[in-house]
Image: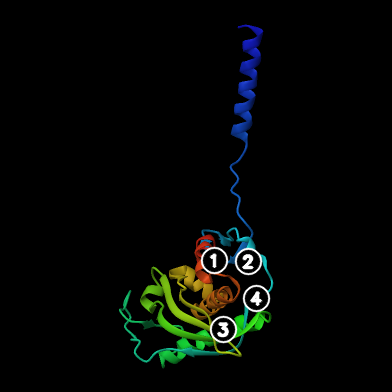
Amino acid sequence: MTPIRIVAAVAMMSALSACGGMPDVATRNAPFEALPPVQTGAAVVPVVAAQPEVPQRQSQTRAAYKIVNYSITVPEDLSVSEANLYYPVADIVWRGDAIGDRKDQVGYIFQESLSRARHSLTDGHAVKAEIVVRRFHSITEKTRYTVGGVHSINFDILLRDAQSGQIVVLRSVKADLKAFGGRRAINADRQGLTMKERIHRHLERVIKAELTVPGGWADQGERLVKGIDQI
């Protein structure tokens, strides 16, 4: 073998050796929310959802709007189901509170979420917010303790100028959230991340997006729910 071929062979063997010795490294962005740990044999491994790349405009600290007054409506004609099926057909399905007036309970969930959002955003154009719930289809006991599913939440939001009453924003919002099931739901409950608390936090984010992002939740929500496994 000629000296040139020997040198080439040695170089190739070195390159292959280096490639074989380097582990594969998966990179991800900073975590957005730590999810419940999952049991894997002898150890508990925390599962951390990755935060997607955030559009540049979301780095702004000032809100476009601040809520000075609000109303929340859950229409009387929405249907309610208490059936413990995998997927009951109804507009409202909710099991995160004791049996009672489900429409009132859903209204209070929106009230708490909106209250959290408005108290953290004190800048911007003063508006009155009017929210009308169109769908709040959570999961039943049967679904929660088996396969999990989706909290399907739709509502309309209307923002009016606090002084003139002129409409400045009117949107229909689709704010679905992944619903934990089985062991993951149990682990979440143990950490205080009940269905109700997860929905509070999610709707707070959605409402904040409606107040700060030009296109609202539809503008940032799609990227977030994919990047953070819908929390």
Sequence-first tag of 1 and 3: 3
Name the mark nearer the viewer: 4 or 1. Answer: 4
Q: Amino acid at mark 4?
A: Ala
Q: Are marks 4 and 2 in contact (CB under 8 Å)?
A: no
Q: Are marks 1 and 3 in contact (CB under 8 Å)?
A: no
- Mark closer to the chain start, 1 or 2: 2
For label 3, the SS is helix
Gap in angstroms between the C-alphas marked 3 and 4 = 15 Å
Q: CA distance from mark 1 to mark 2?
A: 9 Å
Whether residues under marks 1 and 2 lie with C-beta atoms below 8 angstroms apart, the answer is: yes
Residue 114, numbered circle: 3
Task: Report if residue 130 is visible in the image.
Answer: yes
C-alpha gap between disc 4 and disc 1: 15 Å
- Mark 4 or mark 2: which comes first in sequence? 2
| Residue at x 36% of width, y 76% of height | 142
Q: Which residue is mark 1?
A: 220
Q: Are marks 4 and 1 in contact (CB under 8 Å)?
A: no
Q: Secondary structure at mark 2?
A: helix
- Tag 1's secondary structure? helix
Residue 148 position (above or below residue 226):
below
Neighbours of disc 2 within 10 Å: few (<14), some (14-19), many (20+): some
Q: Position of residue 52 (x, y in %)?
A: 58, 59
Give the amino acid type for the residue marked by disc 1 in the picture. Gln
In the picture, which quadrant includes the N terminus?
top right
Q: Which residue is mark 4?
A: 63
Give the residue type at disc 3: Leu
Distance Cα–Cα, label 1 vs label 3: 18 Å
